[in-house]
Amino acid sequence: MPNATEEAQSDAHQHQPAEMELTVIVPARNEEDCLGACLESLVAQSNEFFALGRDWELLVVDDGSTDRTRAIAAGFAGVTVLDPAKLERGWTGKANACWTAAQRARGQWLLFTDADTIHEAGNLRRAMHEAEKHRVGVLSYSPKQLVSGLWQRALMPLVFSELALAYPPEKVSNPELRIAAANGQFLLVKREAYRTLGGHAAVKGEILEDVELAFLAKRRKVGLRFRYAADALSTRMYRNVSAMIEGWTKNLALLFGNTLILAAWRVLDIFLLIGLPLLAWRFWNYGVREVPWFTAGWLLTLVWLRNLWRFYARVAKSNFPAIDCLVSPLALPLFIVLLYRSWFQNTVLHRVSWKGRIYPA
């Protein structure tokens, strides 16, 4: 006859949730305009798991939404909607939501993904295979960016070209180098690695919790892989210009430590792209007989063409369509203003705002 201790252990074992292959966690705060498409793309992948006899779960954390976010999530079969733990001082809302869901997760792998992402068919299975193939505990994708309107089309290539230069994926993925980056829109973590990192509790007050988790992954040697993944997922980060301005004002100073210097270089871009042609035209107006001036005009034109090529070669690293890269100079003044605003909010005011909440920077 089993004793009381054995019976208690058996009962606890019977009530312990069965382990699954994957838990997908979607933190959502007022995401009624994009959550449906995200969940459709995720739920559609169920058949691939079931065909292999595997199980997975999809958790949506409704982080105090005041719109239809919760109702939309609850309308999908197989989706579990959670409330986050009480938001304590020193925590960001997203870290709190992710940490709450991670405590409930049963998956061997945890995928943290944003509500504005759309996942390609088979993406989840391929991502886990990729992480296992490269023997990493953390895999992060930079999605294909979907934009609309002139200002998004012009500004986003400027920002993402700087990100590509500051965080080259091949260097981020190199375990011998200290440089680290990750994108919270797609962050796949082995559960053991997540525990080693301390989870989102270890980055609870960080505005860019994804980048900080990447740094922890490098320091604690759990393995980090990061790449551009248009083949895996896409995202529309901002629905309008005001949201885009708020978002980059929050992030730019945190992503680039040399924000004011970067702004100064972009001011120089404006001078080189606009000022040089004006100077060349000015010198040409003296007439062909003025040989020194005519020569100076051609020389300035050659310098302008060289800088124009260098500018577009840099912007091409953003992985945006050619037409968006072509119009990107139009957004240089806006980019400069956002760099300054971000520096001022983070360095002078020491606070940032996002989705109705204010956090210390």
Image (tube, grey):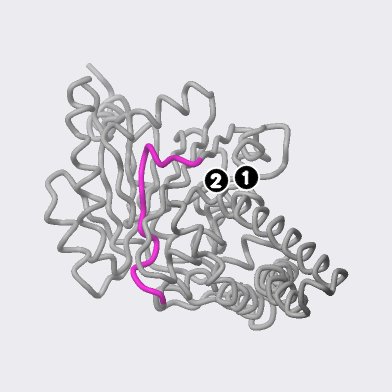
Q: Is residue 215 left or right of residue 17?
A: right
Using a 10 Å C-alpha cutoff, classify the residue at mark 2 as few (fewer than 14 neighbours), some (14 to 19) or many (20 or more): few
Using a 10 Å C-alpha cutoff, classify the residue at mark 1 as few (fewer than 14 neighbours), some (14 to 19) or many (20 or more): many
Instruction: Between residue 232 and residue 213, name the one nearer to us.
Output: 232
Where in the figure is residue 132, as x and y percent of width and height? 47, 23
Distance from Cα at disc 1 to Cα at disc 2? 9 Å
Give the magenta-colored segment's residue range. Answer: 228-241
Q: Amino acid at mark 1?
A: Leu
Q: Is residue 161 left or right of residue 185?
A: right
Give the labeled residue for mark 2: 198
Give the labeled residue for mark 1: 216
Q: Are marks 1 and 2 in contact (CB under 8 Å)?
A: yes
Magenta region includes residue 240: yes
Q: Amino acid at mark 2?
A: Gly
Where residue 324 sits, quadrant-wise, is bottom left
User: Which residue is drawn at the image coordinates 66% and 38% (left, top)?
Assistant: 171
